[in-house]
Amino acid sequence: MSNKLEGKTAVITGGTEGIGLATAQLFVKEGAYVFITGRRQKQLDEAVAAIGSNVTGVQGDVAKLADLDRLYEMVARVKKRIDIIFANAGVGEFVPFPNVSEEHFDKLFDTNVKGALFTVQKGLPLLNDGGSIILTGSVASVKGTAAFGVYAASKAAIRSFVRTWTTDLKARRIRVNAISPGPIDTEGLRELLGSAQAGQDRLKSIGTTVPLGRLGTADEIAKAAVFLASDDSSFVAGVELFVDGGFAQV
């Protein structure tokens, strides 16, 4: 490995599976120390074991501000300062527009929007000047997918945060960027589509609609996160980096 993150400390929310876990593993391989969060202790323990070293797991829900306070208290105790915040935790559900409930709206916006905002805001006192903030967006925000409107709107808010925070934090030279994945073959996508045959068929069908002809992998998103976290992207700020095989581009 090239050790692009040698000596860096990162916080990654939603780090127990999929994109978050793959990114945590790659960050450590590149020389970083990572703090990962997850709501379920068992999955968190398994993720920490899978990463192996230079990792601390902190159980918590990003939608609960007390849990975020506890996360950063642990970070301050173990490492004092951080260089990278990857606000990755998110949740998605398909609900047709006429059936959208307040509960569905609150669930998605509390995790995807409120959670991202306060993950970053509460981390700012520990974040070194010149640090990197990465948010997880989605192609859904620009695609207009049926029955996915609340999720799409939550990810459009993420894109907006990237623009405003780039301005808000410019005096500290903190770079804020978003990664917007296309269809990625993760546990989360499989759960969203359902494990029955219909879900498997839909998974294959989605892959054929991607210009590159397949679903992406969590590792491919992790590599983009390393780029945005490292000095390789030292003049990249305020962007939405689509890692989508062309899905939302053509």
Image: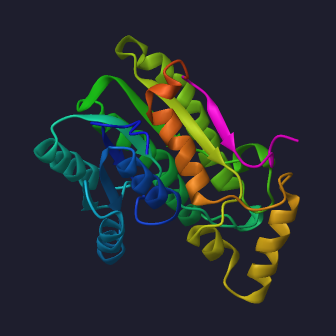
Write the start and end of the magenta stretch as one range: 237-250
Q: Residue at x 64, y 40 (%)?
A: 156
Whether residue 248 is in magenta: the answer is yes
Q: Nearer the viewer, residue 80 or 90?
A: 80
Residue at the front extreme? 1
Q: Where is residue 200 in the image (x, y as percent from the top left)?
A: 75, 80
Vertical order, 124 against 38 (above or below): above
Residue at the bottom extreme? 196
**Which image quadrant: the N terminus?**
top left
Q: Position of residue 202 (x, y in %)?
A: 80, 74
Residue at the top extreme? 171
Q: Where is residue 79 in the image (x, y as percent from the top left)?
A: 16, 42
Q: Residue at x 83, y 53 (%)?
A: 212
Q: Say whether residue 227 is left or right of residue 60.
A: right
**Which image quadrant: the C terminus?**
top right
Q: Which residue is drawn at 67% across and 64% down?
A: 100
Magenta stretch prevailing secondary structure? loop
Vertical order, 16 against 8 (above or below): below
Whether residue 78 is in magenta: the answer is no
Q: In which quarter of the image is residue 190?
A: bottom right
